[in-house]
Image: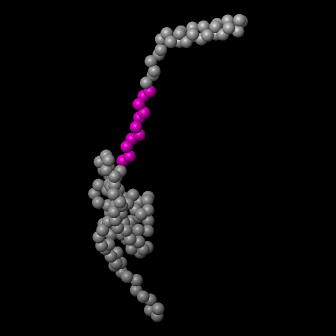
Amino acid sequence: MKAIGRLALAAGLCALISGALAQAPQKPAAQKPAAAKPPARVYYDAYQPLQRPRLKRESCMKTEESVGAYCVKKCNPSYVLKSDVRPMVCQGTNPLPPGVLPGPMRAETGVQPMPPVPENPPKPKPGA
C-alpha cells in the first residue's frame, strides 16, 4: 500500500507542476533579425589589349604604354589597364547591370603596327 501511496503522490506532484507551467505567462519568442544578405557580386566588362615584346633599344609608340618588357596598346576610354594580372586586361570602370554576367574574355582585334625604327641604325664595323 505504501507503494501505491507514493505513486499517487508522485502523480499528483507531476500534475501540479505541469498545471503550473501551463498557466505561467509565456514570453513571446524574440524574433531573430533577418539574416543580412551578402552584397551582390559586381561584374565588370573586360578585354585583352594588343601587346608586343619591347627590345632594349626601342621605345613604345604614343598609342602604347610600357609595362615591363612589353608595349601594351592603351585601353579604350572608360577602361583601366590591369597590369598585375597575366595576360594583361583592360577592365571597365562602370559595373555591369545587376543580373548580367560578363561574357568570355575578348581579345582586341586589329593589326599590331610595326615597332618604331631607330633614327640612327648602328653602322657595321669595318672588317666584320
Front-most of 83 and 109?
109
Q: Quadrant of residue 3?
A: top right
Residue at 30% x, 68% y is 109
Residue located farthest toward the bottom when viewing the structure as drawn? 127
Q: Residue 119: percent from the left, percent from the top? A: 34, 79
User: What is the magenta segment's predominant secondary structure?
Assistant: loop
Q: Residue 82: percent from the left, percent from the top? A: 39, 58
Q: Is residue 49 magenta?
A: no
Work out whether residue 80 can be spotted. Answer: no
Front-most of 37 and 20?
20
Front-most of 97 and 13?
13
* Number of callouts: 0
Residue at 36% x, 66% y is 72
What's the magenta region?
Answer: 32-42
Q: Is residue 37 magenta?
A: yes
Residue at 41% x, 71% y is 53
Q: Classify residue 124 as left or right of residue 108.
A: right
Residue located farthest toward the front when viewing the structure as drawn? 1
